[in-house]
Amino acid sequence: MRYEQGKSLEAFNCLYRELDQIYHGLAVRLGMSDSAFIILYTIAELGEGCLQKDIAAWCSLSRQTVNSSIQNLRAQGFLSLESGKGREKGVFLTLEGKSLIEKKIFPVMEMEKSAFEEMSPGESRKMLELMEKYVQLFRGKVQEGRDV
């Protein structure tokens, strides 16, 4: 059985999967798992000392996945954890972790920035507005259909 989508939704989903594959290909090329890549990327965005729960929320990964990946990155010598309030632990980069982000994550961020800047300000604003609207509408539909 096949669900028939509208052509525009089908094209949107195809582009979404293609973008996901681009990031997966980058992670593979950089010699890391998808979760390690996104966690290091998130630390570069949020800054050192961010909490595991913040990383999980920012990159939409489960806390278990984030914890497991952070433990792997810690075992490889890229991260350290420091106790905070209660059970919270801040995530910090080691010298090796800082070097890894500078060599592998920052160049990806620069590619993203460059691609985004090649669009006109109107195009980038329109893309963001429409994507935000779609996410809000879809989130509402998901919340309405909780029994799914």
Image: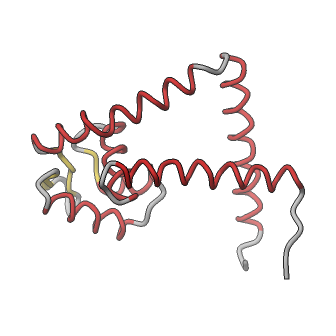
Front residue of 87 and 52: 52
Front residue of 98 and 23: 23
Q: Is residue 72 left or right of residue 20?
A: left
Q: Residue at x 11, y 45 (%)?
A: 94
Q: Is residue 4 above or below residue 128?
A: below
Type of colouring: secondary structure
In x, y percent, where is residue 67?
28, 65
Q: Is residue 93 above or below residue 6?
A: above
Q: Residue furthest front?
A: 29
In x, y percent, where is residue 98?
18, 38
Q: Residue at x 76, y 51 (%)?
A: 137
Q: Is residue 92 left or right of residue 109?
A: left
Residue 31: image quadrant is bottom left
Q: Is residue 61 above or below residue 112?
A: below
Q: Quadrant of the N terminus?
A: bottom right
Residue 48: image quadrant is top left
In x, y percent, where is residue 70?
25, 60
Q: Residue furthest bottom?
A: 1
Q: Quadrant of the C terminus?
A: bottom right
Front residue of 27 and 68: 27
Q: Residue at x 71, y 54 (%)?
A: 14
Q: Is residue 84 left or right of residue 42?
A: left
Q: Is residue 51 left or right of residue 10?
A: left
Q: How many marks?
A: 0
Q: Residue at x 21, y 50 (%)?
A: 91
